[in-house]
Amino acid sequence: MSVRPWWHEAVIYQIYPRSFADSDGDGVGDLQGVIDHLDHVVDLGADTIWLSPFFPSPQRDFGYDVTDYCDVDPAYGTLETADALIDEAHRRGLRVLLDLVPNHTSDEHPWFIESASSRDNPRADWYLWADGRGPDGRKPPTNWRSAFQVSSAWRWHEGRRQWYLATFLPCQPDLNWRNPQVRAAMFDVVRFWLRRGVDGFRLDMYDSILKDPELRDERWGLRVSGSTLAITDERRTRHHPDLFELTRELRAVCREFDDPDEHGVPTRERILLGEVFGSPGELRRYRCDGDGLQLVFLFDFLRFRYSAGWFAKHIAEFERAFPWPDQPTYVLENHDRSRSIDRVGGDLRKARVLAAILCTARGVPTIYMGQELGMSNTYVPLAEARDPIARQYFGWVPEVVARRLPERLNRDEVRTPMQWTAGPNAGFSPPGVTTWLPVNPNHVTRNVADESSDPASLLSWYRTLLSCRRSHPALAHGRLDLLASAPTDVLGYVRSADGERIVVVANLGRAETPVPIGGSGRLLAASDPSVALAGPSVTLPCDSAALVLLDPD
């Protein structure tokens, strides 16, 4: 008996709770605000929500610095609110993924406070501590760099007279996952939330959680991994071979909560979605031959080039690396990277083409809240940044330079409040409230209320695409074959399943182009009203896309 896992056909919607909806008027989004707007996710056509961290935290990295993995920060609500959110999501047919931060905690976590108190306390080895180099031990133990490649990853602690590893921010000490007690404690965190009904986890910076046990130096040099240029080979701090066995252990914990049907087939399989970086081949290793992570993000699309050739090349690479039943996981933007519409100069026509590619390629699309509206970056000067990375690592960049860079240095700019209405505070907070980040002035035209009633809006286009995806097996779970005969500036592929074939074509060029599609059919959806289908050919204006259901052979 063959049953497709639910996540094969999932559409994930990322919610950054702090910026989604403010239910209590304090200027900060909260879990009740998420509950109040779950119907928007359903109406959009997504079926899974991924919630960025809402655990207790000093908010020095806005939730990615955790002080308690098994509670809710009072700014967002309570455990009871979290339970209600899970229940309300399930009542609407939505799955729930939590953002788990396994690599590090806050330096204010009780575990770290105890670990730092001496070299012989019960949690002394729960974090990565090491003696330094040099006669006084005041030189870092290795040459490992922080994730931002601008400083050592080691931080001196005067109390222990030792260094602790902080791969990301200094306030985020790395856990020692080689300690069985740490592993057991984190597995219990996973069980805690699975018992409360969550459907899985997005694993933050998962490829970094195990390091070289011998603390050997990295070898310096330039290396291109996927779309990333690294200044070391990172063999000591990322993708460690021991991580794959740990991944199998974590998957086994999740399997404890799978709900089998009468045939023993899991009907509610819990999933693990990894934030890992590297080439498609490197990322596929985390599948562990079907016994590891079910999904890994493919981050190349975060740095897309608006070119048919670029998309065709990368889709082909992903198809080779993730053949059926593995699933590619596509993402155009998220809470850390520039809004995709800004990458195409604010052009809504191009944003519609990007939406068509994201929602019709084989795999699991992830939509970041507001992406469906065409929400754009909101300029926030570096001097006013709340983002600790912007302040600590890029505060020296002159503002006139920062504003012209293609990649945003300030993550605040992509985390501004969700735009619900054209009214005060975009409907995110009550009128007169100062929101934690400024609302984008363009909320008066780009908001859920107005776009919902406009059939020509980007929101309506996303709803159309996801409706087609739900209604047609070829788009939901079919194979993908690139159209070799597509013109130079056109991306084209055929999705096929259960005797159904759908051709997806997108013109990323500057001129109207006729595209042969290999047969006659009917137009399912088009991003531009002037798209014309005539027999075995569809004519696409520049920056347009179309879906054609081919007639049976």
Image (tube, rainbow, N blue to C red):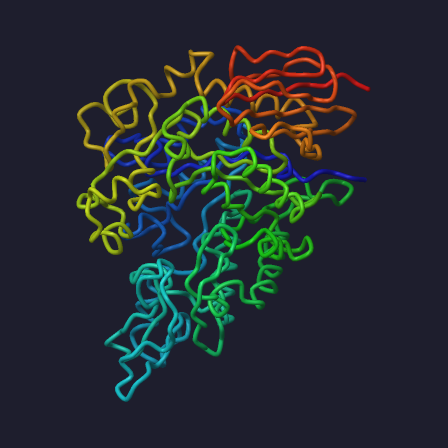
Residue visible at 54% across and 19% down?
464
Instruction: Please provide percent x and percent y for residue 427.
Output: 29, 23
Residue visible at 55% across and 30% down?
357
In this view, 317 is above or below 484:
below
Instruction: Please provide percent x and percent y for residue 247.
Output: 58, 59
**Horizontal side of residue 547 vs 130, given as left or right:** right
In this view, 433 is above or below 237:
above
Residue visible at 59% across and 46% down?
270
Q: Nearer the viewer, residue 96 or 205?
A: 205
Corner quadrant of residue 120 = bottom left
**Horizontal side of residue 200 vs 122, given as left or right:** right
Q: Is residue 43 visible?
A: no
Counting the numbered discs, the total is 0
Quadrant where the image shows the N terminus: top right
Q: Nearer the viewer, residue 516 or 399?
A: 516
In this view, 115 is above or below 434:
below
**Horizontal side of residue 391 vs 326, given as left or right:** left
Instruction: Please provide percent x and percent y for residue 112.
Output: 34, 67
In this view, 369 is above or below 144:
above
Q: Nearer the viewer, residue 45 or 307?
A: 307
Q: Is residue 239 visible?
A: yes
